[in-house]
Amino acid sequence: MEKEKRETSVRRLTVVLVMLGMILALAPGVMAADPTGASTLEENPGAPVDYVWVLICGFLVMFMQPGFAMLEAGFSRAKNVSNVLMKNLVDYSVGSLAFFAVGFALMMGTSAYMLVGTDGFFLAGEAYDVGTSLTWFFMLVFCATAATIVSGAIAERPKFSVYVIYSVVICAVIYPIYGHWLWGGGWLSSADFMTSLGGGYGALDFAGSGVVHAVGGYVALAGCLLLGPRIGKYTKEGKPIPIPGHSITFAVLGAFILWFGWFGFNPGSTLSAHELRISVIAVNTNLCAAAAAMTAMFITWKKFGKADVVMTVNGAVAGLVAITAACAWVAPWASVVIGIVAGFIVCYGYWFLERRGVDDVVGAIPVHGLNGTWGLLALGLFADGTYGNYATAAPFITGLFYGNAGFFGCQLISVVVNFAWAFGTGFLLFYILKHTLGIRVSPEEELAGLDISEHGVVTYPDFVYTEPARPTRIIRMSEAVIERENEPKTGEKGG
Amino acid sequence: MEKEKRETSVRRLTVVLVMLGMILALAPGVMAADPTGASTLEENPGAPVDYVWVLICGFLVMFMQPGFAMLEAGFSRAKNVSNVLMKNLVDYSVGSLAFFAVGFALMMGTSAYMLVGTDGFFLAGEAYDVGTSLTWFFMLVFCATAATIVSGAIAERPKFSVYVIYSVVICAVIYPIYGHWLWGGGWLSSADFMTSLGGGYGALDFAGSGVVHAVGGYVALAGCLLLGPRIGKYTKEGKPIPIPGHSITFAVLGAFILWFGWFGFNPGSTLSAHELRISVIAVNTNLCAAAAAMTAMFITWKKFGKADVVMTVNGAVAGLVAITAACAWVAPWASVVIGIVAGFIVCYGYWFLERRGVDDVVGAIPVHGLNGTWGLLALGLFADGTYGNYATAAPFITGLFYGNAGFFGCQLISVVVNFAWAFGTGFLLFYILKHTLGIRVSPEEELAGLDISEHGVVTYPDFVYTEPARPTRIIRMSEAVIERENEPKTGEKGG
Amino acid sequence: MEKEKRETSVRRLTVVLVMLGMILALAPGVMAADPTGASTLEENPGAPVDYVWVLICGFLVMFMQPGFAMLEAGFSRAKNVSNVLMKNLVDYSVGSLAFFAVGFALMMGTSAYMLVGTDGFFLAGEAYDVGTSLTWFFMLVFCATAATIVSGAIAERPKFSVYVIYSVVICAVIYPIYGHWLWGGGWLSSADFMTSLGGGYGALDFAGSGVVHAVGGYVALAGCLLLGPRIGKYTKEGKPIPIPGHSITFAVLGAFILWFGWFGFNPGSTLSAHELRISVIAVNTNLCAAAAAMTAMFITWKKFGKADVVMTVNGAVAGLVAITAACAWVAPWASVVIGIVAGFIVCYGYWFLERRGVDDVVGAIPVHGLNGTWGLLALGLFADGTYGNYATAAPFITGLFYGNAGFFGCQLISVVVNFAWAFGTGFLLFYILKHTLGIRVSPEEELAGLDISEHGVVTYPDFVYTEPARPTRIIRMSEAVIERENEPKTGEKGG
């Protein structure tokens, strides 16, 4: 089988990479920097609280994975739920391995020409160190967040194998290289022409409105465009038809988990508990999400006469995305304003894209893409000069409204580069995959649902679905599935 | 439309408040106290671990929001789930904004006559500070907990717009003023006649059995009384009929999330990691919940011959509520005893209220109201003199069983005031709303379910409901809903 | 009734135990060690960050309870969900009380002959102390994890009352005694013949691959063998028939929650934030889980032609189990290797056991049992000599691959003892219960589902099940259930 051959190649590649890692890891023996932490502690007796802070915040960011999984599962139809969940499991797992093998080194390794990092592959040698491990873990969970954003947008029609490959590429290459430019000492934050333009600092992105969310959002845009909309999403005249997800409860649970996890995402990005600004960051994060959720709710209330749940949920997440770049550098009142704008962007952005044929199942493009961009701009506008840049010890950050037009210019450059990189590499990736492996399941498989066609499973076998016809004819079942069919106890199932 | 006019007023009010906030925020310029945290850190080098502790505990308390959302959704019928979830999103979001604009200032601002705080509106001026932000965040998540308790009790029949208004009022006024009396330097904790009665300290409530839970519970009681029971809750003879919720799984998930979040709620209320008593608090919290859950389970096992899931779940939460006031000041064995009593209170309290026509969908009144009161009393009984009051550096707290009858008197006063304030203001609020806007949906809307009537959505469109008739005739659908009806892909849906 | 008599005995026993506790607690008065924490803080000014670390990690471990609950509920059929959830509530609650009364003392009290601890019952006397409370809480959540593993394996057929008794026994006796041998100064870690064999240290288990997971897993094996498989699990020829669970969504949510909670489980087991190795532990934990999940996925992909969701989920948890013993003492690359092996073990272990008549509903035996054992061995193989044993200040730990064959011998002894103890005591417990109370419900009750037969409840009353026949004839309903039957509003329900 052609398909199995490809899978075998993937597995072989994995084996080779792991072996390569073992060789790299064993080669330098025990000459690693500080694997016990003893000398780090001696040099910096205040390190424990920083480690505790960064690790626990990292755990919270990792917990955003089930947040996304529940949000995306809830917004998908019952016949595609297991597939969405599997994609979330895969992007985190494969992402962890790819970021371990390659991504981290490209992002945070010694910079070559301010373009890409060059060491730290497989956390081997010097990178087997408590400090590097701390950074690795925190950076990994951010990388995995960028990766998982895409799964929701392109849900319900891509091949599962394509998603596995995509996960490797975004976590090994697309995310890390762009991350290097902002957070790894790369040109967007540190090149001379940028820092002189910004007035001592270049483009900034505190916790990743651009680095994480807009990258995920615009890769998702590329994916949606190349995949095309789901069957039944548009009338013949091109009018969009709402396809409701199967469980608003899971979606709301997911959104609340994301909100919770974001308190790791944003305040944790100080990378130090000695920055007491963390309290202001938490306040700003919360206020912006609240303002955006309520704005989106009132917009739909006015438009439809009823407060819309889905858009309120997306509003909350949009507010979280929008404040992410600016959360450390703006005042609480500004966070409310940023959130109100985010609420408008998510509603009108979603409707705009939907009308133009972009079938984004969960609204990831307006939520993470457009509001990621808005977050970068908002930082350039509202930064009020009350706090600096912990990493570079730069002067306090001020935006356009406080007189620093140059920094707003840096952010504009950042916005353009961000879109070009994410959409460009995403388009290239999915374009190559489309014209080699193919990226979309067959119409029969799509109608049957990806749970059956890609995983041979019914997500909720004990319940009667509203679409009762079970498309057994058109699906070549695996043995496992056939066995389940014959299973005498659970009778006729939906699917 | 009358309804839309009101909504417009709400929106206009929001805009005015936000603008007022901006003016207040911009007026004092950058004369804020310590927005960077640098001078706070210099004065108190041990601050980072306290900030980490309070923030992470605050995050856990925030995470109780999805806990309540899942608990309440699980205990509601499928046709009302989205509405319950929206109420949870709204009370946290609107609550955040109302507490930002007004509530925090009334609660924690400079006290006027020990009755109400007077500054800190919009976190502007001096309140733009790392320490104030820390306090704000921790106080907000407690305020939002009080607010969200009500949504479950009064589920399945109030108008959604009324709930939005209620959320503003409880977070801006009802909760903060009472909170001021206990935690903001107000009269219950600090007036001379109280502290002399208590033997050096007045009424106490460590983490909010009264301030948070009983306030929420008794506002809920007022709401239930003014709304009246759901259609079908009672026979013609007034005998209560159980109306089971749609998903015990979500309810149990919610209860476990609450249990988890409570470890932020109670231990975090030291507001400092330098109080190592936090470990005892965690132990007490856990033991009381466990004892209460098992007590409730055995009560139902004896009464019905089977261990009841719903009451076990409510027992766990009741135990958490009951230990909240006393958790820092009692011994582990006392926590077990308090939990056993809490288990009895929640069962018999629920059945008592249900027989008397109080239709409390999730049992919030016995869980949070009655057990909140019991928590205040238990503190007055079991405080064992092994630990003091961190905030006021008062002597070690002792209760009636350890010889301090005066302090028990303080707690009795607190119990009466707590009920009077919460029930009184809650009754006033819902009474005014009832006789102006109206607080209850029409019987047709209630029968159809609030998801359709208030939000135009079916929570689980891919599943067949046991009540298949879809009441399309009696509901004036919004355009969005009609579109969904016509959607060709998902066939006939439940609802 | 025979059954009620037994229940009464259980309740009476509880009352006696609680009273005994109160007497013990009151007897020594206030001569407790350091209930305020003031002197602990004075002696060790760095204690706050350690307390924060251990407590928050403990909270995360407690949060694994809903992780297990969701995983097990998702893998169970809809008719048994409430029962599984109740078991999770019970083992945590009863476990808390049993560990409070007895278990903790046996595990961590002053050792008698390196076999069992002897003081600290009811946290009374000297044990009413901030340090002891901290240890108690952290140890409790581990104990409860071991307990809850069993509920999933033996789901869908045991009597609920038996599970309550089991919960008491494992938390009061089985787990604590074995835990004493490894973590409480007992013979496996500390006897002279062990430490001389290991080269300065005896058998080790950093965070409990053996102590927690394999103990749970092998008690589960004993339970499964004595209970026998579910009706319908095997054909007449003994061929296993898959019985799919009712909700993959809940199962995946549970797995992600477990992954999240494991970051408390493993890094938290340093019991100190001053061990900066916590960052390496977090990295290792994550990499192993990722590698195991992907390995299991690719195995099923190859075998069935489709990537299997259930096995991927179990793979992730298996990887978490496998790294738990070794996480502090191995390199990141080794964690990946350990995870790949774990992925093979969970798949082939599950299929092996299933073919031999072991009906393990959630796969707990391969996940926790076999991979727990693998974790102990992996530590003996891969420990690389870069980190020591915090508790005993032993030399840096090295395994077989780094020249320490003796330590691998210690681990082999530990593996054998672990299986013998867990399987032996588990078998004894369920054997006695089987031949006294009986451990399995009647076939009629099993077919009807344990929700109805044991708890008188339908978990999802608003949805139509695929097995619509409601077995009202064969179940003697409690009054509460009959009332629900008559409830006029929700019509005909599934179940």
Image: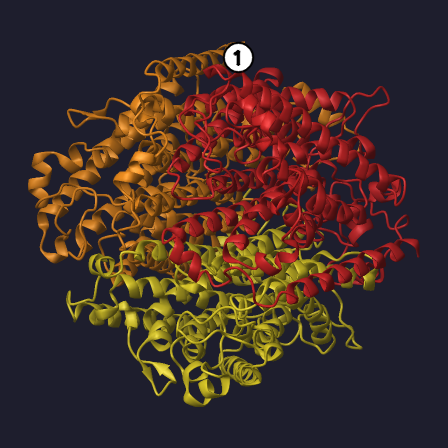
Chain colours: A yellow, B red, C orange
The x, y position of residue A167, in whole percent, is: 45, 70
* The quadrant where residue B456 appears: bottom right
Q: Is residue B179 left or right of residue C52?
A: right
The x, y position of residue B259, in whole percent, is: 51, 38
Q: Secondary structure at mark 1?
A: helix
**Mark 1, other Cα within 10 Å: few <14 / some 14–19 / many ≥20:** few
The x, y position of residue A62, in whole percent, is: 45, 58
Tell me if I can see residue A72 in this picture.
no
Nearest to the observer: residue B107 or residue B13:
B107
* The quadrant where residue B486 appears: bottom right
Residue type of the residue flagged with mark 1: Glu
**Residue drawn at x 58%, y 56% as measured from the top left:** B127
> Considering only vertical position in the picture, is C447 above or below C388?
above
**Badge 1 is on which residue?**
C4
Work out which residue is located at the far bottom of the displayed protein and give it. Answer: A193
Q: Give the position of the C terminus of chain C as an image quadrant.
A: top right
Q: Give the position of the N terminus of chain C as an image quadrant.
A: top right
Q: Is residue A278 left or right of residue B344?
A: left
The x, y position of residue B473, in whole percent, is: 90, 50
Tell me if I can see residue B142 in this picture.
yes
> Considering only vertical position in the picture, is B316 above or below C398?
above
Nearest to the observer: residue A71 or residue B420:
B420
Q: Is residue A400 left or right of residue B480?
A: left
* Chain at tag 1: C
Tally of numbered tags: 1
Work out which residue is located at the far right of the displayed protein and give it. Answer: B1
